[in-house]
Image (cartoon, helix red, strand yellow):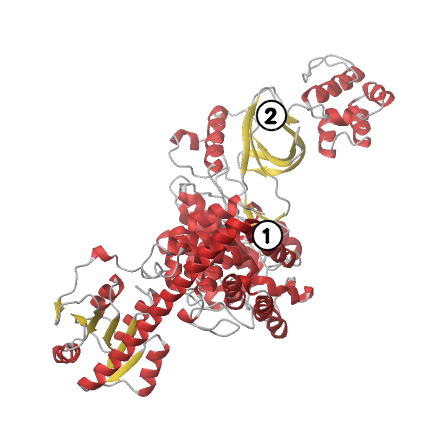
Amino acid sequence: MFPVPSPPMNSDLNTNESDLAAAVLGKLLTTGAIPADAWDQVPLVGREALARQPNLHALADALLTRRLVTPYQAGRIRAGVVNGLVLGNYRILGKIGAGGMGTVFRAEHKKLKTPVAVKAMFADGAPGHRLGIERFFVEVRAVAALRHPNVVAAVDAGEEPHAGPDGENVPYLVMEYVPGKNLDDLVTNEGPLSIAVACQYAYQIADALTEAHGYGLVHRDIKPSNVLVTPDGRVKLLDFGVALLPNVDGRLTKDGARLGTVGYMSPEQARNPRDVDGRADVFGLAATMYFALTGRDPFMPPVGAAAATRPPSLIDARPDAPPALAVALDHMMALDPAARTETAAAAMRELAPFLGWSAATGPAPRIPSKINAPIPRDAIARPSSAGTDKSARGHRILIVDDEHAVRRVCRLALQPEPFTCDEVTNGPDAVAFGLAGGYDLILLDVDLPDLGGEEVLRKLRAHPPAPHLKIIMLSGRASGDDLSRLLSSGADDYLAKPFSVVQLRARVKAAIQLKEAQDRSDTLTRHLASANSELERALTARDGELIHARGALVLAMAKLVGQRSTETGPHLIRIQRYCRVLAAAAAATPAFDARLDTTFVQTVESAAPLHDIGKVAVPDHILNKPGKLTEEELEVMKAHTTIGAETLAEVCSRYPFATGFFHTAIEIARHHHERWDGTGYPDRLAGESIPLSARLVAIADVYDALRSRRVYKPAYSHQTAVEHMLDRSAGHFDPALVDVFRQVAPQFDRVFRDASD
């Protein structure tokens, strides 16, 4: 490297301008502000010329011409202030903006050249500056704990000696660099956002706040300029510089830093910024959303919300806004924190119905956020038993009726048969004992105290305690339409009161015989699968390469389809792993233990990547369309299920050596878009009519789609994806598998992270 003079760089340096320029150049080289590899590319003559520049302005212009510095660096050189152009391993390239307690710069790693953002805190001459530095590092440690896709991630931190303008140490935080526009600039330059987009952005902010509040952090400065929108529609929450931090020495909050922004700061924060909780952030979120929808500040400075008597009306400023959204926004922006939406997670639920809003379709239906879980077997007492003793080949029947006479008739009618009969008298007990498992058939009265028979039926079908449980409804006044509705809700049969002993016995025996046939079919299927497994193991021992070749070909075929869309190779690997995790956990539950053996799980795992093989026939302009599909396009897209299944069936007919594998692959390809409530496609199958293999893949596929970026949506965090699956998907998935998914959701997140795109 060409040597240059490098005397000390002090503001009162007593030297001529040419020597000063040479000294500055030397400092830029020795600190790495000018990359060594870039300097080495400059010819010797050029280096000598740069070392002889007459003054700082000429040096800055010459370096800028050779692209050795950025315009921001050139400006610092002209001012003679080059301290702080390198902080640790990071070269400062330009200024992004000023945030709470610091200035944010665009930078790059000196060796890796990876872009980053660096937040640096410079001395302001105040006596409490040291306390400010202490608080800065408390913030750094707190923010570093956050790992959320809607929070700008912390990468590194440090304190650079003598890097400040007056030679003081400069603490800095290194963050991921995210391209995009802040929401303030976006709305100001391009106008208010659509209802759906504004709600999607606010939903992502609320998701980030839920994570932060879980760590005890209250942001305290939620406003449009602290919300970054990336080109792919993902939102990033910026600047925790004035956050209220957990377990912090109170003196560290008294450094005179700006604690909020008038117009977006809640009234209680304006009164006492140190006595707030997550509801202050919910207020700022709602105020930011109001701005996104209207282009106006919700509360005008200088007094802001502190002098307001009620939140501003969204309908007045945005007449096309749905009234229900205006009510939700009023709730989130209530001036009294006691009347405000309590948590960021609750705000997510209030926004969820409007994520897909359009003037034509309105909001998505509101779905209850809780699913009643089965009562553990050991959490309840056993029911009283009457009638015959249970024989080795007997079936267990639960009689549910509040009339003693009806229960007595049922017990006497069934006494000659090899049945064990238990009795309960009300709906809650029926649910408790039914979900505890062990029954083959339930005789269920429609009119029960505390909880009606129809609701009991729904709860038992939502969480089936065992395969093929039969339920016969009893009613003395239900109409034909009522009984038909009960059959549609999952009842296997019904009897109108009063009924004869012969009628009851015949209906029960028919139901039990059907259950026995279904159980035998399951047993036969398991035996066949086991035999097939033995054959495959024998083949593996002799022809193992063929088995591996099949797996490789499956992934290769599926990957060819995926390359036509936004789906990636890791997506296929993740689908396999999700299915393995979900199936293994389900196999440990009473509802599935008889149907999920090792062979079944391995076959589903192997065949899962072929779920979308039919997309090879879908035109590109439909497959990769960024907007909503028309009805005609949607029908074309739906056809990929039948095309895939028919293609695999044709292959199976020509190569029957792997019938078991192809049978599972065909089930998955055709039915992974069926819904538990019967509203899916292509065959509108419902409940257990949907093959179990397809039910497993459906959960895996939807979870991965939510976590992944698509042309029509950003990638969601794990927490948001799980909330979608549990709270906004009623009727979509097998409820028993949803319960299993709830338990293994953290493992799904690990799969996604380990095999990310």
Q: Which residue, given by chain and number where applicable, does mark 2 sit on?
A: 88
Can residue 342 be seen at all in this image of the molecule?
A: no
N-term mark: 1 or 2: 2
User: In front: 644, or 175?
Assistant: 644
- Amino acid type, residue under disc 1 in the picture: Ala
Disc number for residue 549: 1
- Examine the image and state in which quarter residue 583 appears: bottom left
Mark 2 secondary-structure assignment: loop
Q: What whole-number distance in Å separates the C-alpha atoms at marks 1 and 2?
A: 50 Å
User: In front: 500, or 405?
Assistant: 500
Q: Is residue 295 shown above or below 319?
A: above
Mark 1 secondary-structure assignment: helix
Can residue 685 be seen at all in this image of the molecule?
A: yes
Q: Residue at x 47, y 54 (%)?
A: 602
Disc 1 residue crowd, few under 14, some 14–19, many 20+, Cα 10 Å: few
Percent of width and height locating residue 630: 62, 72
Q: Is residue 350 left or right of residue 302?
A: left
Q: Residue at x 71, y 23 (%)?
A: 80
Percent of width and height locating residue 195: 55, 63
Percent of width and height locating residue 547: 55, 53
Q: Residue at x 12, y 72 (%)?
A: 387
